[in-house]
Image (tube, rainbow, N blue to C red):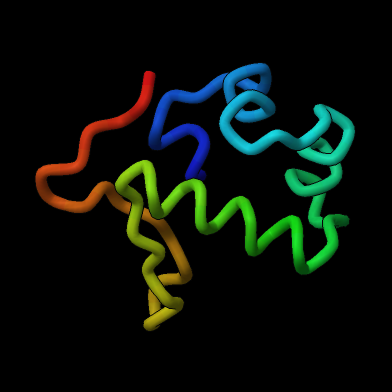
Amino acid sequence: MAKAALGWSNPMMAEMTGLHRNTLNRAENGEAKRSTLELLRRVFEQAGLEFIPANGGGPGVRLRENAESAN
């Protein structure tokens, strides 16, 4: 969801995070290490995303006000 909200492609994700595409694929499949997920979260938050906790409607993401995507 976060990648789509920012309009980032896999090559852009690799560039923004320094992660290999195979690592990104594992993350998308729910098979990533905690450290990888923490890095992804930091990068997404720096790009202007807010992570919304599951509060009856499931977890999600949204752009912070005044945030600009890096695409």
Answer left or right for 23 relative to 65: right
The residue positioned 38% from the left and 49% from the top of the image is: 46
Q: Is residue 59 above or below residue 47?
A: below
The residue positioned 84% from the left and 62% from the top of the image is: 33
Name the quadrant containing residue 28. top right
Q: In what quadrant of the picture does the C terminus appear?
A: top left
The residue positioned 51% from the left and 57% from the top of the image is: 42
Answer left or right for 15 relative to 62: right
Residue 37, position as x, y percentages in the image: 69, 59
Q: Is residue 46 above or below residue 52?
A: above
Which residue, as the protein is rendered here, is positioned at the far left? 66
Residue 8, position as x, y percentages in the image: 50, 24
Name the quadrant containing residue 30. bottom right
Which residue, as the protein is rendered here, is positioned at the far bottom? 55
Residue 6, position as x, y percentages in the image: 40, 32
Residue 29, position as x, y percentages in the image: 81, 47
Answer left or right for 19 relative to 54: right
The residue closer to the viewer here, 57 or 70, is 70
The residue positioned 46% from the left and 48% from the top of the image is: 44
Query: What is the total number of numbered labels drawn onto the structure image?
Result: 0
Q: Is residue 2 above or below residue 71?
A: below
